[in-house]
Amino acid sequence: MPMPDAAPSEDAGVAAPPVHVAIIMDGNGRWAAARGLPRREGHRRGVEALRNIVKAAGELGIRYLTIYSFSAENWSRPADEIEDLMGLLKRFVRNDLADLHKNDVRVRIIGERKNLKPDIRALLDEAEELTANNKGATLVVAFNYGAQQEIAEAARKLAERVARGELSPDQIDAGTIAANLQTHGIPDPELIIRTSGEQRLSNFLLWQAAYAEFVFVPTHWPDFDKAALEAAIEEFGKRERRFGGLSAKARA
């Protein structure tokens, strides 16, 4: 599943890619239901789609790809579905980590790990440790992740530093908070894609998404492919990113 340090695609009609693309992979269950298949088959096909998109991201020259693989709220799902998802995670790491490492991809994991089962935590640690010194693209996996929880944890860290006298309250600004998030050192996403037609963030990268462009597509995640990713990038290329300022037309 290569994600090489590649130049942007020169395919006709494909816009230059953003540096960082984040994807909310949604619709595995609906994809399966529409075909009369069990949800586990939707999740299995979703992993295949992920493998293809990671490869496509490398071919298109995307430097950072963040995937929302399992949210902190997903634990409320039925136990057998969670077991299936954990099994797919294990197979994904075992089958694809070597290829990622071979292609110089660095893997970063964001999300809470303290309460995970030891075997799952060990897999996540292995993925990060093996690829820690890689210099190519970065694959960020949001696992057991919740943005509200992430921001609250950053606030706690800063409050503890203030209590210890290491930091004064007036030193806390947006940069200080960002430096204490799990994504420190990673540029904020420029483009966030959500599949399956839903139009919300679902507790994903709330702080980091402040100036991201959003593309919502009706395609269920198992059917999301390189062409769909290229189409989202093309849509991104049409947007005028003003960051709170005036448009070029208004300034003229």
Image: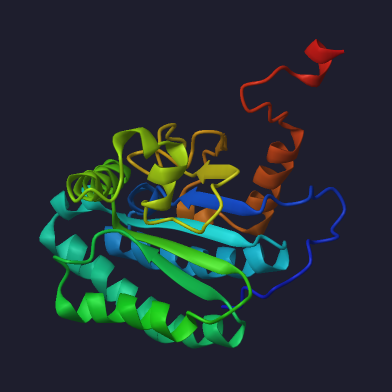
- Point out the image quarter for the C terminus: top right
106 shown above or below 17? below
Indicate the position of residue 66 as horizontal and vertical percent values: 49, 57
Q: Nearer the viewer, residue 54 or 210?
A: 210
Which quarter of the picture shows residue 205? top left
Q: Residue at x 17, y 52 (%)?
A: 77
Q: Does 143 sit left or right of 229 as displayed?
A: left
- Point out the image quarter for the N terminus: bottom right
21 shown above or below 117? above
Q: Residue at x 24, y 75 (%)?
A: 121
Q: Does 122 sit left or right of 55 as displayed?
A: left
Residue 35 visible in the shown view: no
Q: Residue at x 49, y 50 (%)?
A: 23
213 shown above or below 181? above
Q: Residue at x 79, y 67 (%)?
A: 7
Indicate the position of residue 141 as horizontal and vertical percent values: 41, 63
230 shown above or below 89? above
Indicate the position of residue 230 as horizontal and vertical percent values: 70, 51
Q: Nearer the viewer, residue 98 or 114?
A: 114
Indicate the position of residue 95 as horizontal and vertical percent values: 43, 85
Q: Does 139 sit left or right of 173 as displayed?
A: right
